[in-house]
Image: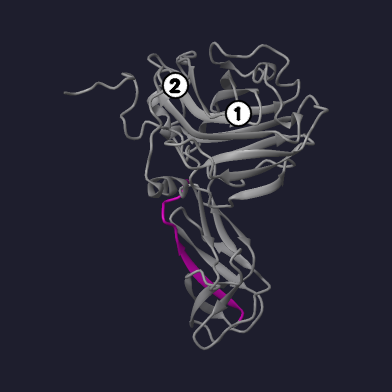
Amino acid sequence: MTKARTNASASPAVGRNMVINGAMNVAQRSASVAGLGAATGMFTVDRWATLLAATAGRFTMSQTADGPNGISANCIKLDCTTADASIAAGEFLILEHQIEGQNVQRIGKGVAGAKQVTVSFYVKASAAFDFALEVFDNDHGRGCSKLFSTTTDWVRQELTFPADVDDGSSPFGDDNASSVRLFFWLHSGSTFTSGTLQSGSFANATNGNRAAGIDSFFSNDANNFFITGVQMEVGPVATEFEQEQISTTLSKCQRYCHVIKGDEDDSTGLIGYSETTGAARFGVLFPQTMRAVPTFALSGTCRAQGGTNDSANFTGGLAISAPNANGSALHLTGTSGLGAADRGYNLQCRADDTTLSFFAEL
């Protein structure tokens, strides 16, 4: 006997979720970062950023092993550490996820036959709050927002957003740029809350209508917010959260971020050669083709170590050279101490908190 899918307009059972790392299982950068609130960025769980403006509130963001049973062992936890009782007009705190245009073509946005989408997620908090989720068309500046409520227990929220036919001439770009942004509005001033929530249809964004009716995460320094199991799919019905192997999720995340971490043995395993007595070059092959040519960041100290020569730490640091989406060369310059040119060397990280990071984020 064959059972039909509950959601007849949904995408196939495998790959129906357009959100990457919705189970919050991958955190290449860090498991926890404290003192956040002054700057926008992606700090812990891959593919999830916090957007901020002008707030005095501060928080800790962490990947926490407190997910709902049977959905995910992990969740994002935001822990308010400094309240903001005086909310200026332009303030906001948003938890954000971005999706490439070529990954949302199934929605058919902007043309006849455009489809509804349903976003579901598991959420809880330290108290009852009303927050908002905005599905935002980043290509054309159009959005639609829905309020959702929290309790102190895990609750699955299922929010269906209408089809956006618009004027028939504005589909999502079929490319590797950001087309859909999921904005979880957790705190905002009157610039974004003074109007009427744009909830019934997509419309060109009017700031006052984007987060009307929400409470503030920063209302008390005892506030917490937890979220996991985020899924966006085609159709008016939320299907069961799509589980996938951790190797699959990591592979998807490495399209946007690849982090090489040092270890207690002070070695990364990157092989290279000396160009001169004061410079060396090491090759990096990315595990996945990245979304775009990445930028590079070094945290910590590296040196080149050879079979017969063990150099001092290089003062010049490590820089990316001739990058592309599949791999790159890292150029280490500074203190002399290498042997003659063209000798083989291993790149050595001087502590287990040293990281080599490559970013191609949206």
x and y percentages locating residue 176 in the rendered image: 46, 39
Does the rendering let one see residue 198? Answer: yes
Q: Residue at x 46, y 34 (%)?
A: 19
Instruction: Place residue 1 in its image quadrant.
Output: top left
Q: Residues within 10 Å of mark 1 (few under 14, many from 20)?
A: some
- Report the side of 270 relative to 338 (left or right): left
Does the rendering let one see residue 48? Answer: no
Q: Which residue is mark 1?
A: 152
Q: Which residues are magenta?
A: 278-291
- Choose between 347 and 219: the one closer to the eye: 219
Most distant residue in the right direction = 86
Q: Which residue is mark 2?
A: 117
Above or below, 326 against 53 in this view is below
Quadrant that contains the C terminus: top right
288 inside magenta stretch = yes
What is the number of callouts on the image? 2
**SS class of the residue under badge 2?**
strand
Residues under labels 2 and 1: Cα distance? 27 Å
x and y percentages locating residue 254 in the rendered image: 46, 50
CB atoms at circles 2 and 1 under 8 Å apart? Answer: no
x and y percentages locating residue 120 in the rendered image: 47, 26
Instruction: Place residue 163 in its image quadrant.
Output: top left
- Report the side of 169 relative to 217 (left or right): left
Above or below, 322 against 63 in this view is below
Q: Amino acid at mark 2?
A: Val
Instruction: Place residue 336 in its image quadrant.
Output: bottom right
